[in-house]
Image: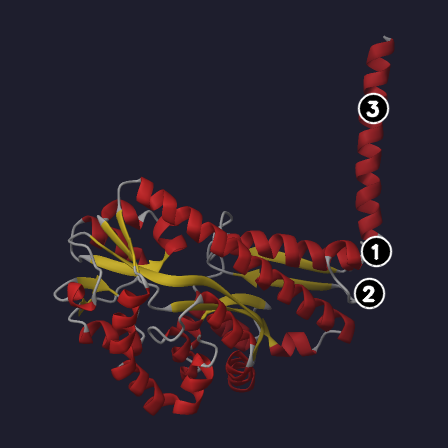
Amino acid sequence: MKRLFCLLLSVVMVLSFAACGVLDRLNGSRADPADLGITTQVTSTDQVTIRFAYSADEEHPTHKATVEKFKDVLEGVTGGNITVELYPNAQLGSQAENLEALRRGDLEMAYLNDSTICAVVPEYYIVGLPYLWTSIDAAHKALDGEFGQYLSKKLKEEVGIRNLAWGDVGFRCITNSRKTIASPTDLKGLKICTLTNPLHVEYFEVCGVVTSPMSFAELYTALQYKTIDGQENPISIIYSNELYKQQNYMTVSEHVFTGINMGIADSFYSSLPADYQALIAEAAANTMAYQRELINAENQAHLAEIEAAGVEVTVLNADQKSSFRKIAEYTVFKTAAESYGKDLVDMAAAHNH
């Protein structure tokens, strides 16, 4: 009887503590900002809900970073006055649909790739210019600097979407089922699924590729039935969608960088108290810095797993990559300069070593 009483008492105490936690949250109990890596001090008590949509799944580094550095932080610092509702797995539609929802004010936040944004701000095509950046550090410095700020300003002024911070999924790589690709001539005659970005298409066609853009939903089946020979995507996408299981060869070409905007509807952001705005901006910067760390580590780990699965992996050395880049300099670099301005292309490439 005594043991039963003690057990019941323990259960009551646990439930009481849980209830206290809920009550504290409802009563506005706030975490110490410093404990969450935040310097912004928040005094506002406005009740705000942020719906945040993106295509990444719950296992992706982008989701992990968003939970730990954005959702948990905003809700903790404000004691629940700001609520962040996450919608991964494209629950609220495609990126293109999310972009339009942001424009209309029907959605507060979404992650948007440069390849999606270029449909409304063409200068974003430069982010995906083949062999624009020679390293991941150069890409980050360009996007965090004057070039990225220029694009973000265009997005806010022309579309009404504010880019809080830049993240990415790294560089794109090539897989195929036919042969090793170690030089531009090895691409000749291969039928490869590429992005619809005209700079991508031009580059691959100059190299002799038969380009075959298609929806991502069709890609795995097309590889499986050899409708196409190969595709190009970031390592994390190649791994998580098991595209490598239908391919014999992979080349770490790092030919195109894929950036991510942490977008927020500017009308919504501008309606918030100043301290909420500052908190969101600081948490966003921390989130994307963490996302970059996670995605880089995951890409390296996944590359090793792809190779262990029996795929022949070719990592281009500096001389090999230079031969690919020279083709870009004589072709798509000129196209980009004519279309969007040489000064803007040079601004983007200024951080290369």
Q: Describe the colour scheme in one phrase.
A: secondary structure
Q: Which residue is the site of mark 2?
A: 45
* Residues at marks 3 and 1 touching, judged by CB atoms closer than 8 Å: no
**Any mark on residue 49, and which?**
none
Q: Is residue 226 left or right of residue 286?
A: left
Mark 3 and mark 1 lie on one chain; the one further toward the N terminus is: 3
Name the element at disc 1: loop
Q: Residue at x 43, y 70 (%)?
A: 96
Percent coordinates x, y for residue 92 in the rendering: 49, 60
* Residues at marks 2 and 1 touching, judged by CB atoms closer than 8 Å: yes
Percent coordinates x, y for residue 36 in the rendering: 74, 55
What is the spatial separation of the Cα atoms under label 2 and label 3, in whole angstroms? 35 Å
Mark 3 neighbour density, 10 Å: few (under 14) some (14–19) many (20 or more): few
Q: Nearer the viewer, residue 314 or 29?
A: 314
Q: Nearer the viewer, residue 225 or 284?
A: 284
Mark 2 neighbour density, 10 Å: few (under 14) some (14–19) many (20 or more): some
What is the spatial separation of the Cα atoms under label 2 and label 1, in whole angstroms? 8 Å
Q: Is residue 60 left or right of residue 324?
A: right
Q: Is residue 88 visible?
A: no
Q: Which residue is the site of mark 1?
A: 28
Q: Is residue 329 above or below residue 56?
A: below
Amino acid type, label 3: Ser
Q: Which residue is the site of mark 3?
A: 10
Image quarter of the C terminus: bottom left
Q: Residue at x 54, y 66 (%)?
A: 110
Amino acid type, label 1: Gly
Percent coordinates x, y for residue 169 in the rendering: 45, 61
Image quarter of the N terminus: top right
